C-alpha cells in the first residue's frame, strides 16, 4: 500500500510532563505515524510514558535516547530498550563500528536501530570548532556518509541525517536503509535564530527520499498543533504527487 502524508511524520514529544504529552498524543494521534520520546520526557517520566502512548494511540514509538558509551554498556542498555517494545531507537554513530554492532546485538531484532550521523544543529563551523579535519568541516556530508557506512556495516536499520543528505544515503546504501530526517522547517515556520542548521522543508525532504520526517516545534508551538500537522501532511502529499508525475 502506498504511504500517505501521515505515514511520514514523526512527532517528538519534547515536553517534560505526562499531562502535556498526553494532550499532544490525543491531539495528534490521527495525524502522525510515530511519536518520538526523547531524553527530557523519558528521564522525567520513565517507561510509563510508553504505556500512555500505547493506551491512547496506534502510532509507533521511537525512543530517541541517542546512546553513546563503551560498547558493552550500550549492548546492555539496548537489551533493556528491546524489552520496552518500542519500534525504533537511536545510538550515536560518532564512536566505533563495534558500539553500533553491540547496539544491534542488544536489540535482538526486537527494535530497529538507527545510527545518528551528525546532529542537525551542527554544521561545518561546529565541526571545525570540534577539531575535525578540514575535509569534514568543509563538507559535513563526508562525515555523514562515513558514519552512515559504519551504521550500515554494523547492521543498523538506518540513520538519522538531515534531509539534505537523504538522497546520497539512499543512493549509496539502498532503498531499505532508512533515512530519518529531523531539522524540518515548513516555509511558514521559519524562525530567526533557529538552533537547527541543516534544515529542509517537508517537500524538500520528500524529494530527497527521506523515509520519516521528525518535525517538532513547527507543530508543537503552532496555535493549533493539529491544524499545523494537517498543513504538513498536505505539503508532503503534494510533494509525493509531484514525484509520481516527475
Ligand atoms: O522540529 P524540532 O527542531 O523541534 O525537532 C527537534 C527534535 O529532533 C528533538 O527531539 C531532537 O532530539 C530531534 N533531533 C534533532 N537532530 C537530530 C536528531 C534528533 O534535532 N540529528
Image: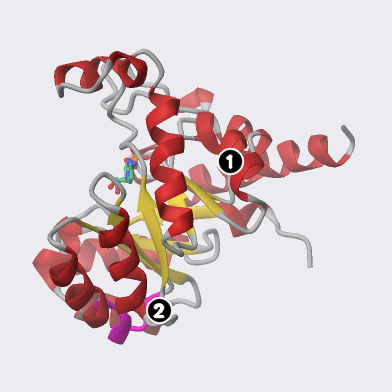
- Disc 2 to disc 1, C-alpha distance: 23 Å
* Residue at figure coordinates x 13%, y 59% from the top left: 69
**Image quadrant for the N terminus?**
bottom right
Q: Within the image, what quadrant is residue 44 found in?
A: bottom left
**Image quadrant for the C terminus?**
top right
Which residues are drawn in magenta? 81-86
For residue 196, say whether it is visible.
yes
Q: Within the image, what quadrant is residue 215 found in?
A: top left
Residue 114 horizontal side relative to residue 246, left or right: left
Q: Foreground residue, 236 or 78?
A: 78
Q: Are marks 2 and 1 in contact (CB under 8 Å)?
A: no
Q: Is residue 11 positioned above or below 190 on the image?
A: below
Residue 173 on image: x %, y %: 59, 48
Residue 231, numbered label: 1
Residue 213 horizontal side relative to residue 98, left or right: right
Q: Foreground residue, 144 or 2?
A: 144
Does the beta carbon of the residue at mark 2 sit less than 8 Å from ligand 1?
no
Q: Within the image, what quadrant is residue 140 found in?
A: top left
Residue 62, numbered label: none
* Residue at figure coordinates x 31%, y 48% from the top left: 93
Q: Is residue 89 positioned above or below 206 on the image?
A: below
Residue count near mark 2 (Cα–Cα under 10 Å), binned few <14, some 14–19, many ≥20: few
* Residue at figure coordinates x 41%, y 41% from the top left: 182
- Could you say whether the residue bearing mark 2 is in a helix, strand or loop? helix
**Residue 109 is covered by the magenta coloring:** no
Residue 24 on image: x %, y %: 35, 60
Residue 2 on image: x %, y %: 78, 61
| Of the image marks 2 and 1, the number of the one nearer the N terminus | 2
Please give the residue where the numbered disc 2 appears in the rendered image: 56
- Could you say whether the residue bearing mark 1 is in a helix, strand or loop? helix
Amino acid at each position: 500500500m502506498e504511504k500517505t502524508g501521515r505515514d511520514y511524520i514523526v512527532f517528538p514529544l519534547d515536553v517534560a510532563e505526562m499531562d502535556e504529552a498526553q494532550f499532544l498524543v490525543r491531539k495528534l494521534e490521527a495525524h502522525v505515524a510515530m511519536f518520538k520520546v526523547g531524553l527530557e520526557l523519558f528521564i522525567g517520566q520513565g517507561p510509563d510514558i510508553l504505556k500512555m502512548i500505547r493506551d491512547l494511540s496506534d502510532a509507533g514509538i521511537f525512543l530517541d535516547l541517542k546512546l553513546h558509551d563503551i560498547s558493552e554498556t550500550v549492548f546492555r542498555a539496548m537489551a533493556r530498550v528491546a524489552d520496552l517494545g518500542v519500534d525504533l531507537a537511536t545510538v550515536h554513530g560518532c564512536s566505533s563500528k563495534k558500539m553500533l554492532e553491540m547496539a544491534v546485538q542488544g536489540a535482538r531484532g526486537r527494535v530497529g536501530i538507527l545510527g545518528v550521523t551528525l546532529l542537525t544543529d551542527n554544521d561545518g563551523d561546529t565541526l571545525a570548532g570540534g577539531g575535525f579535519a578540514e575535509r569534514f568541516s568543509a563538507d559535513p556530508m563526508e562525515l555523514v556518509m562515513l558514519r552512515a557506512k559504519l551504521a550500515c556495516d554494523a547492521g543498523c536499520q538506518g540513520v538519522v541525517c538531515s534531509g539534505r543528505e537523504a538522497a546520497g544515503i539512499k543512493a549509496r546504501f539502498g532503498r531499505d536503509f532508512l533515512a530519518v530526517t529531523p531539522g524540518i522547517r515548513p516555509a511558514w515556520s521559519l524562525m530567526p535564530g533557529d538552533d537547527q542548521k541543516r534544515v529542509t522543508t517537508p517537500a524538500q525532504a520528500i524529494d530527497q527520499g527521506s523515509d520519516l520526517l521528525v518535525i517538532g516545534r513547527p507543530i508543537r508551538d503552532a496555535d493549533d498543533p493539529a491544524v499545523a500537522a494537517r498543513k504538513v501532511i498536505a505539503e508532503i502529499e503534494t510533494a509525493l504527487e509531484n514525484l509520481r508525475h516527475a
